[in-house]
Amino acid sequence: MGKKGNANGQSTNTTNELIAKCRAEPDLAASLELMEKLPCQELSASQLAAVLSLLATKAASAGKDLAASGLELGEKMLAASAATNSGRPLEPAVTVMVRLCCSAGRPQRALALVEEARRAGMKPKLRNLLPVLVQAADAQDTVACEAVWAEIPKWGLVPQDTEYAAMLRGHTGKRQRQKEILLQMLEDLPLPSDPPLVQEIGNVFGVDKVLDFKGTSPQMREGREEGDGSGRRWHVGWSSIDPLGVCSLSGYTLQGLRIS
């Protein structure tokens, strides 16, 4: 029994050494050669996640062909790991594979991988979809944003702050769609508090350059006029609220929500 334990320890050490070499190797092609030597079916959950994460990071700055090779190897590793778990992929590994798909320019493959894993018995999480949604939002690809958004309820999930922030950002300039997203958000998240989401909500109403107003006198600053295309107009400016709740810029009594 002692010899077997020692052999397992040596195998783990060898695997960790290979992973460390992959991490230190800046070239993806050389890393792929090292990763091919890894015993896929013997990788622990943490080792598998580490290798896939390395692939995703390196593929992001590699050429198209190399990134495709990295994705192919990643899928091979994921399948080998799933085979030791009654065919069900590990959720953390699937999440990293989604990142790898995005790095390789294959967002549709990322969605397909999650669906395949779900059918195999994995319970999907929002983080499985987030890299695809964020990438689509950053590219202002509204079609891709909507495709990911449609999958969320299908998988029995409810979007949270990060997903709403990405959708609002992805639909910049699409006021009507942003309004629909905000109305849905009020049902799911009546009191949003995540700073990036609060910022995106502000951007919908034109507060995208609010820092420009800092340091100016509210009494002297009329603000920037905004509108939603339906005749409704408002002004965006930097203001303050006195102890009675009166806005020094508009003169209206407002209710402020303190967000830390």
Image (cartoon, rainbow, N blue to C red):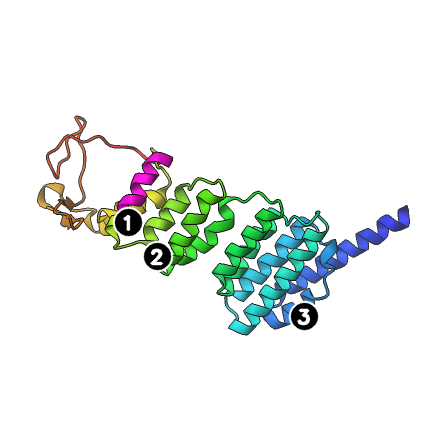
Query: Is mark 1 in CB contact (under 8 Å) with mark 2?
Result: yes
Question: What's drawn in magenta, residue-wise?
Answer: 178-188
- Can residue 62 be seen here? The reply is yes
- Can residue 189 be seen here? The reply is no
| First along the sequence among labels 3 and 1 | 3
Q: Label 3, label 1: how many angstroms apart (C-alpha)?
A: 47 Å
Q: Amino acid at mark 3?
A: Glu
Mark 3 is surrounded, within 10 Å at the Cα level, by few (under 14), some (14 to 19) or many (20 or more) other residues, namely few
Residue wearing tag 2: 142
Q: Residue at x 25, y 55 (%)?
A: 173
Residue wearing tag 3: 33
Is 179 above or below relative to 136? Answer: above
From the top left corner, tell me how far across and down residue 43 is, in percent: 71, 54
From the top left corner, tell me how far across and down residue 175 is, in percent: 24, 50
The kind of secondary structure element at disc 2 is: helix
Residue wearing tag 1: 177
195 relative position to 40: left or right: left
